[in-house]
Image: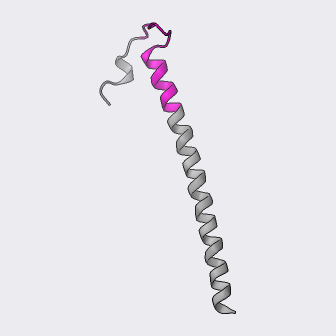
Amino acid sequence: MLCSPENWERSEGNQGVSQLDFFNQNQSGQNQLKGRFIKLNNQLDKNALFLGQISAKRLTQ
């Protein structure tokens, strides 16, 4: 990161959003995305496990 949020001033810009507020919103969005990817990966793991069980059953029949 170029500069740490601690050094940013809470100066209001033209759009009324400070750098610190923008940084916090961005972090929040990234955390939500990470959570969604973790859920997706878990679902893919469950699907793979399920398909593996079906394949194993077919092989043993």
How is the structure coloured here? one colour
Q: Position of residue 26 (x, y in %)?
A: 48, 29
| 32 up-or-down from 11: above or below | below
Does 41 sit left or right of 13 as displayed? right
Start and end of the magenta stretch? 10-28
Report the residue at 49% width, 19% height from top: 21
Does 60 sit left or right of 25 as displayed? right
Report the residue at 60% width, 52% height from top: 39
Report the residue at 61% width, 77% height from top: 52
Q: Position of residue 27 (x, y in %)?
A: 48, 31
Report the residue at 53% width, 31% height from top: 28
| 25 up-or-down from 30: above or below | above
| 39 up-or-down from 32: above or below | below
Q: Quadrant of residue 57?
A: bottom right
Residue most toward the right?
61
Does 6 sit left or right of 57 as displayed? left
Q: Quadrant of residue 50?
A: bottom right
Does the magenta segment cover residue 25?
yes
- Position of the C terminus by quadrant: bottom right
Residue most toward the left?
2
Q: Position of residue 34 (x, y in %)?
A: 52, 44
Q: Nearer the viewer, residue 5 or 41?
A: 41
| 47 up-or-down from 32: above or below | below
- Position of the N terminus by quadrant: top left
